[in-house]
Amino acid sequence: MSLLPTELDILGMKIKVVNEAILDKEEVYGDWDGPNLTIRVDATGTPDQQLVTLLHEVMHVIDEFTHMRLSHQNVYLISQLIFVFLKENPKLLPLFLKESV
């Protein structure tokens, strides 16, 4: 059973998340299908691999929606850095989840 959500809300768009084995991969752990608003994450990876892949694909979505034109290397670096930051600072997460006063 996957711990990943089946849908994300990114910049007001509903994005479907599919967690399945990617059999045709060549160092591909996920992908972003813009026309179908779908992120696919390889279910055979470790939980951390799946999470960092999800972050990576979310960065592609944000990049596409905002026309930032990030290089793939920058998408990779940003997603890795956010993943490490969140893992190293778990006490910070509840602050982001609190309702504004």
Image (cartoon, rainbow, N blue to C red):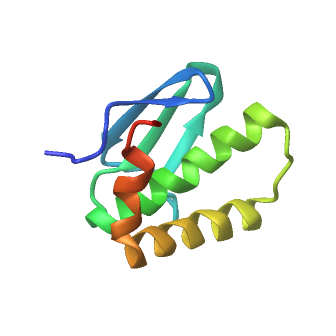
| Up-down relation of residue 4 to residue 11 (above or below) | below
> As drawn, which residue projects farthest toward the front?
101
Residue at the outermost bottom position: 88
Q: Is residue 7 left or right of residue 78?
A: left
Q: Give the image quarter of residue 64.
A: top right
Front in this rendered view, residue 41 or 63: 63
Considering every residue shown, the one lying at the far left of the view is: 1
The quadrant the C terminus occupies is: top left
* Residue 14 percent across, percent down from the top left: 50, 21
Inspect this view and state whether residue 29 appears: no
Image coordinates of residue 65 in percent, x first then y, are 74, 31
Occupied quadrant, residue 51:
bottom left
Which quadrant holds residue 97? top left
Residue closer to the observer: 86 or 48:
86
Residue 87 is left or right of residue 36, and the answer is: left
Q: Which quadrant would the N terminus be assigned to in this image?
A: top left
What residue is rendered at 29% in x and 45% in y? 4
**Can I make out residue 67 in this image?**
yes
- x and y percentages locating residue 81 in the rendered image: 58, 72
Name above or below for residue 77 compared with residue 59.
below
How many numbered circles does the render carry?
A: 0
> At 58% across and 63% down in the image, what residue appears?
79
Above or below residue 55? Residue 27 is below
Decide if residue 62 is on the left or right side of residue 43: right
